Amino acid sequence: MVADRAGYTVTMFLVDISPSMVETRIVDLPPGPTGEERTREVSSLEYSLQYVKLRIQDMIFHGRKTEQCGVIIFGSDDTHNVVNEKNGGYDHVTEFIPIGQPNATTLAKLDTLKPSETSGDPIDALIVAIETQDQYLEKKRTWTRKIVLLTDGKNPMEIEDWEATVHKMNALHISLDVVGIDFDDEEIGYQEEGKKNIKFENEAFYAKFTSSLSNGEVGTFEKALQERYRPEPKDTKSTLMGTMLRLGDVDVRPDEAMEVLVKTSKCTMLERPKSWKKFARRQAVKQDAEDETQDVDGQVDEDKKTVFSQLRMRTEYYVDHSESKDDTDDEDNEEGEDVKKKNAPEKVEKEQLIRGFKYGATYAPCPDGQFPKLPTKKGIDICGFFHRQNFRRDFSMGEVQYVWADPSSALQQVTLSSVVQAMADKDVLAIARWVMRDGADPKMGVLCPSQFDKVDCLLWVQMPFADDVRKYTFAPLEHLVSKKGDPITTHPYLPTSEQMSAMENFVDAMDLMDAGEKDEDGHRQPWFDTRLSYNPAIHRTKQALYHSAIVNDVVSNPLAPPHPELVMYFDPPKRAVKRAREAVEECQTVFKVKEIPKRAAKRARKDGHVRARDDDEEMLLLDLKGPKPSASESQTTSQEPYTNQVSEDADAGSETESEDEELLLDQPKSGAKANPPPTPARLASTDVDPGRERGRIIGTTYPLQDFKKNIAQGDLVTKAVEDMAYVIKEIVLRPFASRRHKELISCLTALRETCLKEDEIDAWNKFLRDLKESCLSPPGNPAFWAEVKKSGRGMSLISSPEAANLGGVSDISESTASNFIM
Amino acid sequence: MAPFDDWNNIDEEEEEELQDASYFEGKRDVILFCIDCSPSMQELKEDPVYEGVQTSRLLTSLEAAMQIQKKKVLVGPNDCVGILLFNTTRTNEEAGYASEIKKGCFVYQQLGQVNAPKIQELIQLVEGAREDSDLLKSEYPPLEGKRVPIGDVFTSCNWVIRDNAPKTATKRVFLITDNDDPHPGTKQLLTSARTTLVDLIESGVQVEPFFIGTEDRPFDPTKFYSSVLINSGFDDEAEDEGTLPESISITRINDLLAQMRIHEVPKRAIFNITFELANDFVIGVKGYGLVTEQKKGSYKYFVDLGDRMEVAESRTVYIDEEQQAEVEKSQLVYGMELGAPPANENSDDEMDGAEYGTRVVPYGQRPFYDAEEVRSFRTLELEPGLKLLGFKDRNELAFEDNVKHSTFIYPDEQKYAGSRRTFTAMLKVMLEKDKIGLVRALLRKNAAPVFCAMLPQAEKVEEGGWNEPGGFHLIPLPFADDIRAAPIEEGFRASDDVKNAARAWIDKLCVKNGAYPPDTYPNPALAFHNAQLQASAFREEFDPESFEDVTLPKYDMMHKRAGELIKEWKKVLFKDDAANTIIATAGTKRKADVSVDEAEIRSKYEDGTLNKLRNDQLKEFLKNKSQPVSGKKADLVERVADWLTSHS
């Protein structure tokens, strides 16, 4: 592809709305919170519109006036296009959205499209698109032309004279992307079953057609869609900023000083996720919010609409007249302090306000908002040099900058190069003081020599001022001293030699220097490369932003999992994990790290906190869909006064944090919260509290996922089976288990299948008997056993013939197995 | 937000949308200076700094307290301070709670929010005492012959703090004394001291002692204080509650201020999370911000209430403009900007009622996310914690792999028993093998995951003073998104001759065993600002001339050491062939006539005919000299003239 000029593009989308586009397919959605599989039925048209909307959203996102698009539909019942108006023919092709800069209305309009009664010809549409685009760009000859064709390829087309079309398109430098629904793709190994001959031929034609174009491509829908979400860094050109690198006193002793003209540019620059705009539902009738999930199920009044409006931010100023406000935020309200709270803050207009600083309790007026600044002179002054080995890497405070010699002066280049080379030779760094502009605040930093293939430069990073370094005291880790002042050599805080050797094995095993891919010579490379590590928050947020822009309901149509490249560094490489297995076990044994149960609650508030954290409680909260019981709402409000409260111990920061967490949990949730779209990260991550008991590898929270994961790793099958059986029984016998019956049945199915395949037949038979007995004896869960029975023979004990099929052994006869489940 | 809070905020921007950081503001620091006035504290000595002036340990202590207060008032304007003197015969005049203050203790400065008059009063006392060396003795006469029981001192502290400190603050007593054995042979007073200290601790106050010793008479904490202070010994609770064994400072009187500076800000962890080394192998760690940019405080808005100035608190509200209705925070949903209003009007007709800035969907549907969902997109549904990914060689951590400051982690024994030995073992092994760790980190609930290099730091113990703690620095690595390519790929390079000439002066300017010394570089811009702020609060005139910027290069020293060598280097440089190459400007649209020879410009400047040059020529010249090219022609001419003057 030719490098695109940003903007100056007209993209024509040609959308097939022929009757065949009504055909639906089942699309897998990310599994629900309990691991249940979720699917959604989507028509070919909805499917292809998703792609179109995604492309259009990209344009809206960039917001360029010169990035425009138009939509042409074919297969429409009527006809409305420029070619037909002029010459006739080209029926059932309609210019649906005229070329222009797209916005949210464009997307909304696409949603009104429905499959038609007539089929249309994509080639007709293509010719109409070329013509429409050409007319529009008559005076804008330099603009880039793109056409995107979406079709299921099931309808006949008129392919005569296609070479002429190719010729015309090449002449106009039009690029064409054909996105085919269920087209075969060798790369992702997709082949449609029962493909009709006509589609076969059409696919072949598209392949021939696009390859004859100087810029054409055909691809299947899934691949095209996934490619849209591949993380890609924004290619930003850094600007070169001119400044001076000074050595010595250039004003007073110029003959003994040096001034080099340099240009600086960013080497690293922290990118942040795109910001979210805030909206709110307009005229929100109370019950709307609460009935939401039910509504999706279909009992929707067609005419009713929900309106969301974008919000504006406004800053208001308040002044508190009560003088004793120090006390108002006290933790206990019982001392009758609420009387003071009635003294409500008064709103004041910004015009009445005076700017100033606080000097303790004293007001220091400063109407300009800042005092006169320290007079400084632009440039980088070298203050001295020191050896690289003494560089404190942890002092580096911010982004890194390149310092280049002026590209237009050989003298400056040689000058800087000599300094860089000499510094590299001696292995030293320079201490330097940088003033960005005249009058700007100076910064201290170090300059590090950097030699590229053909050019030398310096790298700058900011170092802390005295004010920026905090010297906290920490208890020594190794040099423990007794009360009497004598050194201590054995103590639970000090690792023993046995522990040291276990750790050494662990560190060796987890070495990443040879845990990456092999290079051309077959040598393993280090694992992890910053240049391939994409910021997950940026790309996930972008994906979510786009998704919300193109779907009308994020509850029934949740976001797809993140692109695999986004999470590829989330867990250590398999190679290292495998290698470290023994070392980890050794470490677990010798270090004996134990989680300490939370100390008994001191106050009611803490009590509430612990409860909210509790596993079962969380399940309850998650399972509550629809209307929130008012109880939990009042709980929220009753806790709110505590958010500002800080407890007196040194850990107050983290405590306050967990209170927030608690609030989040308790916040009234709309239906969607009960259904957070899970991601592979959630699946892969062990950071989510999986409800695992000590020593168990399967938790009560996501048993099926835990199980599948362990089986997939294939190393702890027996343990996984044992723990799964344990956990299933555990959940079944809990109160309120009925909500999870369906999930548990899936667990059983998975467990049985694994037992059969992995020769854990006895384990299954033993477990199932135990389960039956537990369910049927009080307190038990007879309802669940009834559910199991419904699954029939396939869920019963594994019989001898069944086992023999897979080469296993069982002592259960076929009839015992059948009777057992009756 | 006060600059102080920056320390406790991992990343303000990261929080912006989702979390109200206001709870940090409630976290105040309270320091009660508790200073011994015994005869030995008041004994007069030659001042080591000012010739012919007499000073005492008490005076030095008061001066240190003043310096700390002056700093506090800037970095934590909401913090509270007070001064209590003990072992003095002066009695409290104030009524009320004063009756509870034990005999021999005198509240010199009531505990309360720091303010200008308070500090000025203290300054006057210190200055007065310097002029009249007997002032302190007469104002606060020492208790001769006996000592106030330390238990009484603690009780008095407790009363002062109980009545005047905000309940939610971090409360500390800075105990300053030179007597290591106040109650020789009295077991009972020791016990009472311990009991009263426990009371103090239980009400949330920490005691941080500053013991003054001399070379002849070192302070021996084992005589009395170790049995009082470290009563909890080496048990797990010692770390955060009660007196910390590590917080005892024994110092010479002249280092008192330096010692106090270390303790000036209470040690606060910014996060307290788990560190997963492997499956089922998890320890607890706490994080501390040891390096963070200390910024100037931002200005605040004040309201004139007649009798006083009060800060106006700001509050952000979200408004539906059409309806002029305020929307509650819990009702907010998040999504993407809706794009520009439609360009062609005719596309509107079908969209019934859809006005700009709104989005209409079928009833009951929701095309936006709630706050919790938005958070999950940042965190990728990870929970706060560190996860070890593996180890790499130390040299894999490049100089340029940096985007922001590091944080320091230290084991937390309170969540996982055994964290310390595991952490220490890992630290020692990594130091020995010269490895760094690679971790995936989510430092708090609202943050985004980052990959960090984990740089081990060896524990360094030195006699007295501050020790380099053992632990790991977490250095956030740049993502692919943060890395910019080098825009310049080719340039002229120096020959060995020129390089060696440069090496000569670099050798002279290289500090042996030197390193970057943060302590010697106080932020000049911040100091300049603070000096003006103080002058404004004290209603004094500020004299900018009196301000010295110590970050400027030490020119005299540099020229003395390397001046000749730099001259030499320049000679070699100007003779170098490569350096004299003329670089043909690449074929841009602007033709060569833009660049005018410097000599020609100089001659025009000398003739006073710079005006004859065209704007683009002036700009080209300025650009070459890395000067701004903005402004009108007159500005350009002036700038060129300025440059030529300063470079003649």
Image (cartoon, rainbow, N blue to C red):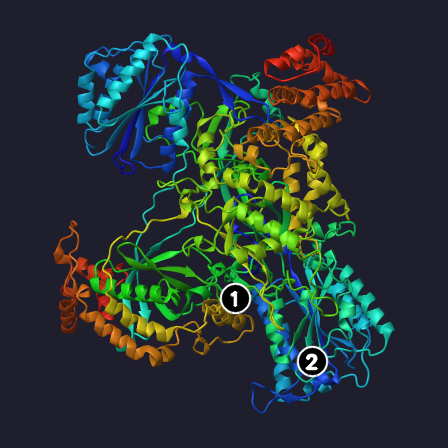
- Residue found 65% across the figure and 17% down from its top: A809
User: Mark 1 or mark 2: which is in front?
Assistant: 2
* Rendered position, B154 above or below B23: below
Front residue of B547/B282: it is B282
Task: Residue A471: give x, y in percent of width and height.
Answer: 58, 65
Q: Secondary structure at mark 1?
A: helix
Front residue of B550/A773: it is A773
Kindly identify which residue carries mark 2. B218
Q: Is residue A333 visible?
A: yes
Marks 1 and 2 belong to one chain: no
Is the residue under label 2 in contact with that under label 1 (CB below 8 Å)? Answer: no
Task: Residue B365: give x, y in percent of width and height.
Answer: 53, 25
Judged left or right of residue A691, residue A463 is left
Q: Amino acid at mark 2?
A: Pro
Residue farthest to the bottom, as pictured? B52
Chain holding disc 1: A
